[in-house]
Amino acid sequence: MRVSVVITTYNRRPSLERCLKSLAEQTFPADAYEVVVVADGCSDDTDAFLKNYVPAHGFCWLSQANQGQPTAQNVGIAAASGDFVILMDDDCICGRELVAAHSEAHRNEDLAVVIGAVLLHPDTPRGTPGDLKRQVEDTEFDRLNAGEIRRSDLMLCANSSIARQTALEYPFDPAYKRMHDVEAGLRLWAKGYRPKFVANAVAYELFTKPVAGVLSDSRYQGKYEVLLTAQHPKFKPLAALVRINEGNPLKRWLRKQMAMH
């Protein structure tokens, strides 16, 4: 097995079903990849759906009491059998070339964290949160596609991949309920790993979070940015709170909203 796609999910069975459907339609050979799903304390019909799900590619799923995404991702990586793991969120719909693009990007690359493109899905509801999210993601795609790779791009977020053995050696820290992907990236950078952007590994995020959810995320991000700065002083120049007045008016406004909330 060359590639394992690891997905964690919590009470979002419809989103998970769309994600899994897109992964079942990959151009990559079905016998060369698997999908591992960790149901993290789901109380809806997710477990029943997974129990009856039988795709052509390799597949396994685990159910556990709710422990948060970092722990669930560690469990999924440990259960995987691929040479590489692709981390995916359950609200992402994957382009058909995604698995193949990640696999190809890892050839002859020992110290790479491959990051794919994350764009807003066309079915995302219109409104302030979705419109702002779309503009931010489009801007980030244009930057990365132009080859402007930054140190802050090294994170184990949705649509990123890494050698499974490396992921086992540098597991997520469960103390971080948010930004655990950034914290892992800081440790990997210190060990010589670098980000590698692959434009044709595309995941489309179906963003449905309301304003209240966005503000809640902002509070958590501010909290864990402070924790990251204390634990990893080299992170401070990368923190959004430090960069609050950089960039165009939209970015400055977004950062100020995060700081206030």
Image (cartoon, helix red, strand yellow):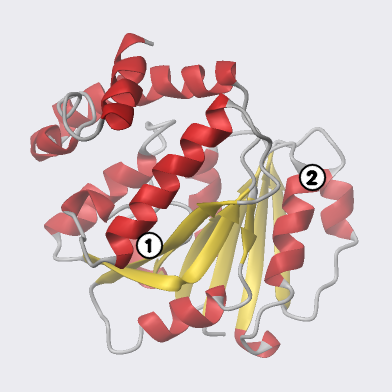
Amino acid marked by disc 1: Ala
Mark 2 or mark 1, earlier in chain: 2
Amino acid marked by disc 2: Arg
Could one spot residue 171 in this view of the protein? no
> How many neighbours does mark 1 have within 10 angstroms: few (below 14), some (14-19), or many (20 or more)?
many
In the rendered image, which quarter is residue 168 located in?
A: bottom left
Query: In this rendering, would 50 be left or right of 225?
Result: right
Residue, x 18% and y 55% (percent of image)? 150
Residue 206 horizontal/vertical position (percent)? 64, 46
> In what quadrant of the picture does the N terminus appear?
bottom right
Residue 259 horizontal/vertical position (percent)? 30, 15
Could one spot residue 44 in this view of the protein? yes
Query: In this rendering, would 223 be left or right of 59?
Result: left
Check residue 167 in the rendering and tell me which mark sits there, or answer none: 1
> How many neighbours does mark 2 have within 10 angstroms: few (below 14), some (14-19), or many (20 or more)?
many
Pointer 2: what residue? 13
Q: Is residue 82 above or below residue 148?
A: below
Residue, x 32% and y 21% (percent of image)? 253
Front residue of 30/174: it is: 30
In the rendered image, which quarter is residue 207 located in?
A: top right
Query: In this rendering, would 211 be left or right of 185?
Result: right
Q: CA distance from mark 2 to mark 1?
A: 26 Å
Q: Is residue 62 above or below residue 131?
A: below
Residue, x 35% and y 19% (percent of image)? 258
